[in-house]
Image: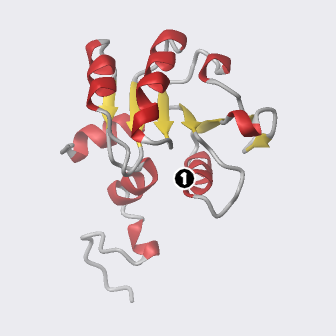
Amino acid sequence: MSYTDAFLKSVLARSKVIAVVGVSLNPVRPSYYVARYLSLRGYRVIGVNPGHAGAMLFGEEVRGAIEELPAEVDMVDIFRRSEAVPGIVEDALAHLPGLRTVWMQIGVENAAAAAAAEARGIDVVMNRCPKIEYQRLHGELRMGGFNTGVISSKL
């Protein structure tokens, strides 16, 4: 899928409360450091993982299921295999009245679940990472050694 920078930037700008489904408490796991990064950028991040339910992560209690999330969650970031996405999206659509975005991480795609969300007016991003997109769109990727396209005299 191809997404315009304006679309991705608008999704990231309007999102305030992000549920990270499949979050890990292990700081070397991508789901942990993506959630940490987003929380450091001012998002309220709530982890969802039945194996870690009740643990505290970035000032929030990890929830065991989507049904336990507060109604103000407006974005769901999915760190699960593609085949798990339909059930996650179904639960999110049923239990999150403020949901505006379903975001599937790099390598995660499910066209049927995306169509179901879009039919309800929910924006969908597949096979992308909100951390990487935030960094790219805000000129931060240089810290990771990537070309940001910004010309600078700094070494």
Circle 1: residue type? Val
The residue labelled by disc 1 is: 34
Picture quarter containing residue 81?
top left
Q: Percent x, y for residue 43? A: 57, 39
- Classify 3 as above or below 75: below
Q: Percent x, y for residue 50? A: 70, 33
The answer to whether any part of residue 15 appears in the image is no
Q: Residue furthest front?
A: 83
Q: Residue at x 21, y 43 (%)?
A: 3
Q: Is residue 152 left or right of residue 79?
A: left
Where, quadrant-wise, is the N terminus in this rendering? Answer: top left
Q: Is residue 51 left or right of residue 93?
A: right
Of 106 and 16, nearer the camera is 106
Q: Residue furthest bottom?
A: 155
Q: Is residue 126 left or right of residue 53?
A: left
SS of the residue at dot 1? Answer: helix
Q: Residue at x 47, y 23 (%)?
A: 87
